[in-house]
Structures are given as C-alpha cells and as structure tokens.
Image (cartoon, helix red, strand yellow):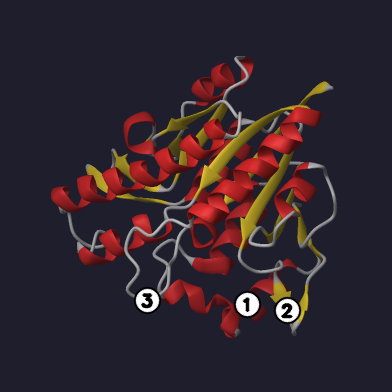
Amino acid sequence: MRDDEIIILKIGGSIITDKSKGSFEKAKFDVIERISREISQFLMENRKKIILVHGAGSFGHPHVEKYNLKEKKELRGVLTTHFACKRLNSIVCDKLLENGVHALGIHPLTSFFLDEKLNINIDLFLDMLTEDIIPVTHGDMIYNRKRKFFEVLSGDSIISALMGELSDRKLRVGLATDVDGVIYDGRVVKEINADNFEEVLSAIDKSAMDAERKSDVTGGMKGKIGALFRSIHGSEVRIFNGAIEGNIIKFLKGEALGTLIRGK
C-alpha cells in the first residue's frame, strides 16, 4: 500500500564501519548486508518512499583528522576524503541492489553546496522517489561559498536540511545509532520535548555518553539532538539502536523504539 509519507533513515557510521582506534576504511559487510535485507523485507510488504543517509565512519573521520580538514585548506585531503566516502556509499548501494532494493548514491560534494544554509537539491531526491529509487546520500566534504573552500558535512546536517526542505510533507525520521537511544541517569529517555530538552542536553554534556565526540569530527550525541530539535517542524524523530538485528525493520514499520524527539 502506498501513501504520501516519506521515511528518512540515517544509519550511523559506527554501525556500518569499524571506528575503533586505528581502524581505517573498514566496512562491516555483514551488518550492511543485514540492514539491506531488513529494508528489502519491509519494501516487499510496504510501498513506501525512503531516503537513506549514512555516516562516513572510518572511511571519513581518519582522513579528516590526518589532513586536519577542520582547520586547514588541504585540497588533497578534501578529495581523498570524498573518494573514501564514495567507496563506502558504493558498498551500501551495492548491497541494497543485491537484495532487490533500487538504490542510487547522491554525493554531497558534487550535488550540494553551502552558503547561508545547506542547499541539497531537493528536486533530485524527489525525482528519484517518483521513480521508486531510494536516494542514498552520506557524510562527505562540501563546498562553502562564503569560506571559498571545502568543509566537513555530517549526515546529521543532511538530515536537518532534508527535514527543512520537506517540512510540508508527512515525514517519519529515524537515526540508527549504536546505542539504545538517548541515555540520561542510566536509562533511555523515552521522549525529548520542549519541557525537558535543556535538562537532557545539559546532562549529556556532563556524561560519558558524549565521549564519542572526542574521536568524532561531526559532533557526537549532543550535536545530533540539538540540530534535530531545531529542525523538527511537526515531525517526529526517533533515535534507536540500529546495531540490534530487527530494529531497522521495526522502525520502518512504525514501532516505538529508543528515544522519541518532538519539536516545539
């Protein structure tokens, strides 16, 4: 059955790549295969429109750190990082296609640009959805017209931009991470809303949960929540554990997983 809902699913780089210390461009092929099967199974039973976004993981972060791309204008580093991110995207798209899912990569460096905001060419996404193709975009480098050079673009920033461009559509958004949701005081927070947003964000800032940002050039859990909360326009977002088998298809089916984020 088809309806007008668009599902946006972001798969964290920590799920589909090995991001442990010293890891370099190591894809978790078994996990990518499993996620592809779950998406395929869902689509066989539901004619839904899906946009996939994935992080760069160990295909992106080590290059960004090696060339110090947060601080330096290093063209070789920009291109090396981009080509590595494209390799991971090709692995993901190939596995999806092997499982019967028509998926096609959209590469931010050659499709998007940044000025006052992130410009993501939303018509390209919508055209692909019309043709029953799943757009698969990813963390990458992007050209900043104000800075007149390139900078890191996270998958989370793409999610926020997609939500803004599609604010007039019925959306369901999920962030598949390697944790069960947002953890506060040792428990998964079931819902983050205007009433508890500041309290939860402050707690994350002081907790070990955000230790990932020390090795993650795109900001960690606090950055994810802040960006999402500001981007939600009547939609709902779930942060859940995509490393657990079956959770991807559960999210796609609309089951309550992890932490629900509601905007103002």
Which residue is at 56% across, 55% downward? Answer: 31
Relative to 231, is 68 above or below? Answer: below
Of badges 3 and 1, the one in the foreground is 3
Q: Residue 36's x, y, as percent?
A: 60, 42
> Where is mark 1, residue-wise?
204
Q: Is residue 236 visible?
A: no
Which residue is at 18% across, 59% downward? Answer: 72
| Mark 2, secondary structure of its residue | strand
Q: CA distance from mark 2 to mark 3?
A: 26 Å
Amino acid at the residue labelled 2 = Tyr
Amino acid at the residue labelled 3 = Lys
Q: Is residue 163 visible?
A: yes
Categorize mark 3 by other alpha carbons within 10 Å: few (<14), some (14-19), many (20+).
Answer: few
> Where is mark 2, residue-wise?
184
> Where is mark 3, residue-wise?
21
Q: Earlier in the sequence, mark 2 or mark 3?
A: 3
Q: Earlier in the sequence, mark 1 or mark 2?
A: 2
Q: Residue 58's x, y, as percent?
A: 38, 61
* Nearer-the-camera pick, 100 or 204: 100
Q: Identify the image quadrant of residue 22.
A: bottom left
Q: Which mark is residue 151?
A: none
Q: Quadrant of the N terminus?
A: top right
